[in-house]
Amino acid sequence: MTKNGILCEVNGKRVCLDPKNTDTTGVNFVSHAHADHLPSKNGGTILSSIETSEIANLRGFKMENHVESLDDFSLIDSGHILGARGLLFDDIFYTGDICTRNRGFLQGAKIPKCKTLITECTFGLPEFVFPKMDEIQKQVNELISELYGKGIPVILMGYQLGKAQTITQLFGHWGPLYFHDSVNEMNNLHQKFGVKLKDGIGHSEAQKSGLLEKKPWIMVAPMMSSKSKFIQDMKSKYGAVTIGFSGWAQSTKFSFGRRTDYSIPMSDHCDFNELVDLVVKSGAEQVYTIHGFVEEFAEHLKKKLGISAQPLLENSLDEFT
């Protein structure tokens, strides 16, 4: 692990995994297009899915020297968001952000066998065990029905890229259906790649046309603070109620997971049990943990399962050379 991210030097090859700055002499793997995984500049070869490249372009980063495949590298669907991939090479599997649970149009990741596993553990504590998707759908549909019965409009909130599209597919049967403009733009790109999402009207057009005055309605919007002007306007003008979707809502320790009127524990990452299952299925002899509860999860793997595991910390680069 370096200040620039994860660098693997194997058989004379330099492989940078989700680097902050690309390496001009090596292969730069970009797992997906969430902002914290995109590099800040071009350089060298960038390996990613075509979906990740196009979403990155929409978000202001145009990948140069982009390739979708390279000899000796296998891109594995990680089930996180559209286009998200893990990378398998030289018996090393890097998960990137990963989810093994089916969610709407997103199919859970299938875990390849490897000797060395580099896995995220965003929710690597035992308290993070999420409800099943059918339970979430039942709970939210009942909640929307109750609010609709009172003539109250509902705003469903999740990350603009990923969760907002899952929410659209799971709850788009309610109507009239509106979208925050940024979600509408991202949904359109998903539709371009064949993802079936119900069409809707952007919030600016709906507001300008007076459609929001006719209540109730449902809107899909990015996760944002209750103090944001958009949310305050929606509440003061239309009496809207917010339902937020976040894995952090599973724990009472993290208040930012419950910034909405109602909070639903749904995530685009593996929960604790799924992370453990992922490790076991990989058959890895050595596990490195990144992003999240790295020390706690590595300790669990060692003590409970007898698996060699440690956090991948800066200056532990020699493990990969």
Image (cartoon, helix red, strand yellow):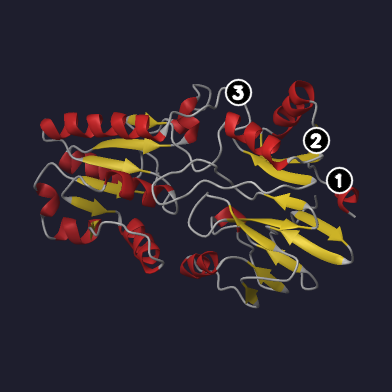
Q: Are marks 1 and 2 in contact (CB under 8 Å)?
A: yes
Q: Which residue is mark 1?
A: 316
Residue 194 position, x and y percent, is: 38, 65
Q: Is residue 11 above or below residue 67?
A: above
Measure how far apart labels 1 and 2 are at the Cα level. Answer: 10 Å
Report the mark closest to the observer, 1 or 2.
2
Mark 3 is surrounded, within 10 Å at the Cα level, by few (under 14), some (14 to 19) or many (20 or more) other residues, namely few
* Dot placed on the residue nearer the N-terminal end, 2 or 3: 3
Amino acid of disc 1: Ser
Q: Nearer the viewer, residue 290 or 229?
A: 290
According to the image, label 2 marks what residue? Answer: 310
Q: Is residue 22 visible?
A: no
Give the mark nearer the N terminus: 1 vs 2: 2
Query: Please, what secondary structure does the residue beneath circle 2 have?
Result: strand
Q: Is residue 129 left or right of residue 243?
A: right
Q: Residue at x 54, y 64 (%)?
A: 52
Q: Which mark is residue 126?
A: 3
Please state the horizontal and vertical placement of residue 109, each as a whole percent of the image: 56, 47
178 w.r.t. 289: above or below: below
Measure how far apart labels 2 and 3 are at the Cα level.
18 Å
Amino acid type, label 2 = Gln
Q: Decide: few, some or many residues near mark 1? Use Cα within 10 Å; few <14, some 14-19, many ≥20.
A: few
**Circle 1: element type:** loop
Whole-number angstrom distance, CA of label 1 to CA of label 3? 26 Å
